[in-house]
Amino acid sequence: MTVVVVAPLALERFVRAALSAAGADGATTDAAARAMLHGSRLGVDSHGVRLLEHYVTVMEGGRVNKTPNLAFVAERAAVATLDADHAHGALAAYAAMDKATELARSAGIGAVSIRNSSHFGPAGAYALAAAEAGMIGFATCNSDAFVRLHGGARRFHGTNPLAVAVPADGHPWLFDMATSAIPFNRVQLYRSLGVEVPEGTGSDAAGLDTLDADAVEMLAPLGAAFGFKGAGLAGIAEIFSAVLSGMGLSFELLPMGGDDKSTPRGLGAFVMAINPEAFISRAAFDAGMRRYLDALRTSPPRADGTVMAPGDREWAVAEERLDGIPLDPVTVEGFGRLAERYGLPSLEGL
């Protein structure tokens, strides 16, 4: 099976139809579709619509609440805690960022801890929501353990992303990273292609580096020989998302891909919005970002390099994908199963 290219609006209709058919309420459908399409439009395909079948499966199984009652259970001047009632993680994260933005408008900063959530997909989507509202946004979460510590031989942290978005002329400055050397879906891709993983990215069951994709039992932290930096960054995500919310640490969580699709995983997450105008005039802030980005993008590249600001690659991909978003064969097969299960139009009919 080959890659199939689907128009963005048609793809969104299919995603929404599948979520609704699975019983998701309107707010859940809106948030999950928004987050997945963010990933697919910006080229973050690992956290795009390829997650649709998984999300439908865990909703049907009961792990994710299809009709949750989100509640802010604690609030102070600039902080709040959201109990997500085991909602889809995107619904919880967008609601939390909306609250953080509201708090930042009056207090200058807003921070929201999220408890009883689930997998939320692309962290950058929620940081971006703040930037689109004129704020500096930050979002992080932890996930089930798959990444060893620096020098370690046990799955300890999740891929634990960190994302920041900043308003700027044109598109926001957007940085969204996993704290592992590579994401696990990349290992799966290398396995399917029969090629080696890059040096210093995967480890075998003893925690030793391996190039054999089939032998990878855990991921290495970002940084290779300086992997203590990636492990430390993963710890930041762990503390802000799990410890601060009272939820499970990465090595305590049920695996995302495990057989149990009925028990809620109880994930934690954290978002923050900062209002630049609490520190400096909007005009001065915008001018500072303009000077910074102009200097960055015109900085001389080395002979074999290209200089880009964080987000430039993603915005370029989004422009390219206005006319069509590519779906890999595994995702196409999953869509086919959903179409058959719920009587939805096939991809060929979109």
Image (spheres, rainbow, N blue to C red):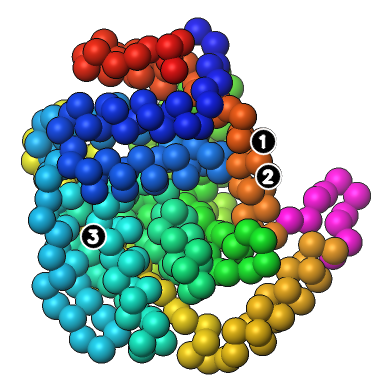
Please, what is the dominant secondary structure of the magenta stretch? loop
* Closest to the observer, 73 or 286: 286
In the rendered structure, which segment of residues is drawn in magenta? 299-308
Q: Which amino acid does label 3 sit on?
A: Gly
x and y, in percent, of residue 72 in the image: 15, 70
Q: Which amino acid does label 1 sit on?
A: Glu
SS for tag 2?
Answer: helix
**Distance in Å between CA atoms under marks 2 and 1:** 6 Å
Q: Which amino acid does label 2 sit on?
A: Ala
SS for tag 1?
Answer: helix
Neighbours of disc 3 within 10 Å: few (<14), some (14-19), many (20+): many
Report the residue at 61% width, 63% height from top: 173
Residues at discs 2 and 1 in contact (Cβ within 8 Å): yes
Question: Residue 293 magenta-drawn?
Answer: no
Report the residue at 45% width, 79% height from top: 274
Q: Where is mark 1, residue-wise?
A: 320
x and y, in percent, of residue 238 in the image: 31, 63
Q: Can residue 190 be seen in this view?
A: no
Neighbours of disc 1 within 10 Å: few (<14), some (14-19), many (20+): some
